[in-house]
Amino acid sequence: MKTKNSLPWRLVCEDNVSAGYGLAADEYFTSAYGAEKTDTEATLRLYTYRDHCALVGRFQHIQAELDLEACRAEGIQVGRRLTGGGAIIMGKDQLGICLASHSKRFEWTTIRDLCALLSVPVVNALKKLGIEATFRAKNDLEVARKKIAGLGVYVDPHGAFHFHTSLLVDLDIPQMLKVLQIPVQKFSDKQKVESVAQRITTVSREAGRKVEMAEMRQLIQAEYEAFFQVQLQEKAVSPEERQHIDRITEERYQNEEWLFQRSPQADMTGMSLKKTPAGLLRTYIGLKGETIKSVLITGDFLEDAELFSQVEAQLKWSPLDRDAIERTVTGIFIKNNHPNLNINPEDVVNAIWLAGQRAHAAERYTYEGSCYYPEEGER
Amino acid sequence: MKKIKNFTIRTDLFYATEEGFWLDITGNIARIGMSPLVQETTGSFVAVRFEDEGARFGRGESFGSLEAEKHVGHLKMPVSGTIVAVNEKVVENPHLLNTDPYGQGWLVEIDMTGGDAGQAHLLSGEKEVEAWFEAEIEKFEDKGWLAES
């Protein structure tokens, strides 16, 4: 695959960057392509954040997504990305892969198309480690139904873009759970870790050995070079560029108006408990207005049920609409040849819908309060 | 209304083909929304924000931003104008962009008074709109980005 021109590509490698700098540098390189002030075709930035930074998506409600008190106590910096999606934790074991360029330089039709194209080298790099990663609904990369990387795209008004991948080379799940608000607050710490470990994996875990960041970085670089038939030329951030990035950091990413901007949509959570022939089905849901931002379906009998992981992934960022939920769940049951789980699709649809209705009716998040979680005994 | 493959399209409106917007123009006021094809190929919208009423924008300038499937992009003004109304319903429930693009999913209304008279680029006419839309569908089908009808 070749881009439209034959200009060189730039490589920027950085480590231990702050939340503000990390995000501002992505924006800086993007805007350079928007202003056409660059003599390179694209810039690939491979970087790590300082341990740790918690980053929310462009339109998320930061107080609803992060435990800000815990962030302060743990010395975790917070930031708001330009890209969408959910809250993530980044640090020395998560590789930030940011490709900045101009959309006119690539062959693409839709943003999905562009996203798929630009993530091919990441998939190929994982393959070199013996890891078969594939796309999952809503722009994640997964391995055997577990998320290994989150993808996002930001396109500026001039058509410049950055494509960002947050690759989990390793992950400290308990640390993540200290600061991210997930809709299973009633779980014990052990249950929470298990719940996340069932849905997320890492490069080291899949490779069966500790994969060093340097090795991962080299693989990513090599696969971008091979796929786009270019040679990346490493060039560090210059003092002048640093000044620009520092200004963006100060003006946007450290600006409280940016960080704490209000979302017009309320964040709500709810749960439902439903008895089925197979056992108790426990469903947690997080809503943003009328949108499902997360679903967790649990039950002792579900531990290995891949089908529910598919339901969770498919419903993420979809509308809270009973018909749509029904179509999704039924479709996944059909696709999986109706596995013999002693649970029928109607039970699952009803459980999700009930949780959604409860979330919708729940107290809405306010700055003074915290997320509302129904009592476990409530049915 | 015209049914083209799986889409129902209004052929009585103006279209900014580059942005994929429709414009319902009465006098100097234009209501702007997204064509059904844009919402289909972009995915499920989860957030939309607009600049404030009273703000003036030239053609191509950003009057808002939106998020769909972790992609964040800008809404670019198809003609010059001043925002006179924003659709708060769509801000609260962005899925209206997907479910009712010609109705409750409209974006903003603008006053084009004093603009640069740059409306010649807008497409109109039943046959012209139909032909454009069919070509667009074909383009996306070739790429495999639309479900088979």
Image (spheres, grey):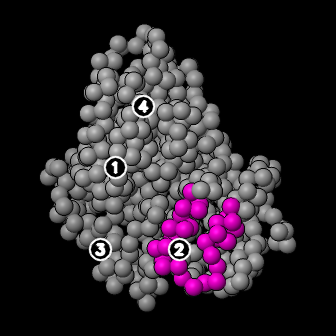
Q: Which mark is residue A124?
A: 3
What amino acid type is highlighted by mark number 2? Answer: Phe
Cβ atoms at labels 3 and 1 below 8 Å apart: no
Q: Nearer the viewer, mark 1 or mark 4?
A: 4
Host chain of mark 2: A
Which is nearer the eye, A38 or B75?
A: B75
Q: Which residue is mark 4?
A: B1
State whether discs 1 and 4 lie on one chain. no
Q: Mark 1 and mark 4 in contact? Answer it, CB < 8 Å.
A: no
Q: Which residue is mark 1?
A: A110
Neighbor class of circle 3 (other Cα within 10 Å; few <14, some 14-19, many 20+) is many
Q: Quadrant of the N terminus of chain A?
A: bottom left
Is A342 included in the stretch rendered in magenta? yes
Q: Residue at x 17, y 58 (%)?
A: A2
Q: CA distance from mark 3 to mark 4?
A: 46 Å
Residue appearing at x 31%, y 29% in the figure? B129
Image coordinates for residue A294, horizontal then vertical, percent: 61, 63
Residue identifier under label 2? A333
In this view, the residue in front, A3 or B101, is B101
Labels 2, 1: front one: 2
Q: Earlier in the sequence, mark 3 or mark 1?
A: 1
Between marks 1 and 4, how big is the CA–CA gap?
Answer: 26 Å
